[in-house]
Every structure is written in C-alpha cells, then in structure tokens.
Image (cartoon, rainbow, N blue to C red):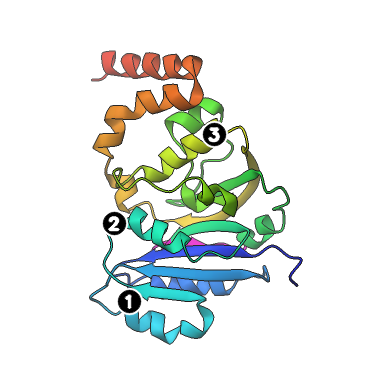
Amino acid sequence: MNSIPLISVILVTYNAEKCLQACLDSIFRQTYPRIELIIMDGASTDATVSILEANTEKITFWRSEKDQGIYDAMNKALDYVRGEWVYFIGADDELTHEFSSMANELVDSRTIYYGSVWKDGRKYLGKLSSYHHAKTGINHQAILYPASIFQQYRYDPMYPISADHILNMWCWKDTDYRFEFRDYVIATFNHTGISSLKKDIRFEKRKAQFILENYGVVIWLRFLFKKLKASLFMP
C-alpha cells in the first residue's frame, strides 16, 4: 500500500453546516486507497465544528481557529501535509468518482495535473491554451499539485479571491514544473461562491503585469489587445 502515492486533500471551512457533510461524504466515497484529509476551520459559529467532531475518525487532522481568510487557512493547512500530492476543495464543492480515476494517473512528480469541473451543470474548462491559462486560470478544484510545489510557493493572502490564479502563474513560469491536462471531471464546483460573483480588484489592476512576468511579451500583448478591443466595443 505504501508504494501508492498519498494524496493530501485540504478542505477549508467557515460556517459550512449546510454543505459540509455532502462534501465530506464525496471524499469518503473515493476508491483511491490513500487519501489523508486535512481541515482548517475559521472558528465557525454554526454547527460546522459539531459535524467535524462527528466525522473525526475519518479525518486525518482538523483544527478550528480564526484566520485571515481562505488563502491564509490553506497556507496553514499545508504545514500538516504528509502526502506526495496536494488537492484543495471548498466545503461547498464535491468530488466526483472520476477524482479517483485521475489520482491513479499521477506518475510524474514534476507535473501539475489538471482536469475539469462541473460548473452550473456544464463541464468547465477543459484543456487550456497558454493564453487562457494566463487570462482565465484553472479552478483549483481541478488541480492535483506535487507537494514539492508548496516547499517553494504559498498563497499570497493580499489577493483574497485570485491568489490561486497567481500561484498557477508562478508555476507556469517555473521550468522545473509543467501543466498536463487529463480529461476527467473531478469535482462539482459551486458557481455561486465569492470567486464566481466578485472580482479581485487588486489582482485585476496588476493582472497585465503578472502576465508579462510569467508568460512573456507575446501573451501579454495579446491580453492587452483583447482588453482594448473589449473596451472599445463595450455597449
């Protein structure tokens, strides 16, 4: 069994009593044999902690304490990771059975594997070009990272909505790693969450610079051209 890579699933929660058990059950149903579950709760005031206590025998580690937001909690959770691979899921998301199928294909410790998610009943996003990787980014619910990534990088909490996009930008530039698509839909993504409804204003102001730094001049110019074109023809 120990020859099978351990996957560390990180779940960040806050007042998630309405959806948490469904998320947990989707993790517990996985057929992949080596999953550890790490949960960081932001000092919930509803029944979230009671749900965690009721499931504690199936959870590798959990803690409830105040944090500075989602990415701060994710960074804290990374300190407890023991697996060779890391996956992040929100309490209002759920894994599909295809997560285990994709997990069985994790063979290269220098590859960041990504698939798709179900979003509002549709498959989203599929395989991305370099340009769309820069512009749109990949849902973190679609990505399995080599744990070594987080020995070099952590999420920047200065960007409360887009820190995962920025981390992926850094990884894209890093020649020690590469992104590889696998055609699995591994999670159901809640499209009514904050990341779908709001923009990260600080990130949007600096997005072009991030693209230039991490993707180069050609993709940067394409991004600026399309942004200008959209502004000129905006109704």
Q: Is residue 92 magenta?
A: yes
Camera-nearest residue between 168 and 32: 168
Q: Are marks 3 and 1 in contact (CB under 8 Å)?
A: no
Mark 3 vs mark 1, CA separation in Å = 36 Å
Q: Amino acid at mark 3?
A: Trp
Q: Residue at x 36, y 23 (%)?
A: 208
Camera-nearest residue between 55 and 190: 55
Disc 3 is placed on an element classified as helix
**Left or right of 65 on screen, residue 217:** right
Residue behind mark 2: 69
Q: Amino acid at mark 1?
A: Thr
Vertical placement of 56 versus 174: above or below? below
Name the quadrant containing residue 14: bottom left
Residue neighbourhood size for the residue with mark 3, other residues' Cα within 10 Å, grouped as few (<14), some (14–19), many (≥20): some
Vertical placement of 218 versus 8: above or below? above
Q: Which residues are magenta?
A: 90-97
Residue behind mark 3: 172
Q: Is residue 217 magenta?
A: no
Q: Residue at x 29, y 71 (%)?
A: 65
**Left or right of 125 on screen, residue 50:** left
Q: Are marks 3 and 2 in contact (CB under 8 Å)?
A: no
Residue behind mark 1: 48
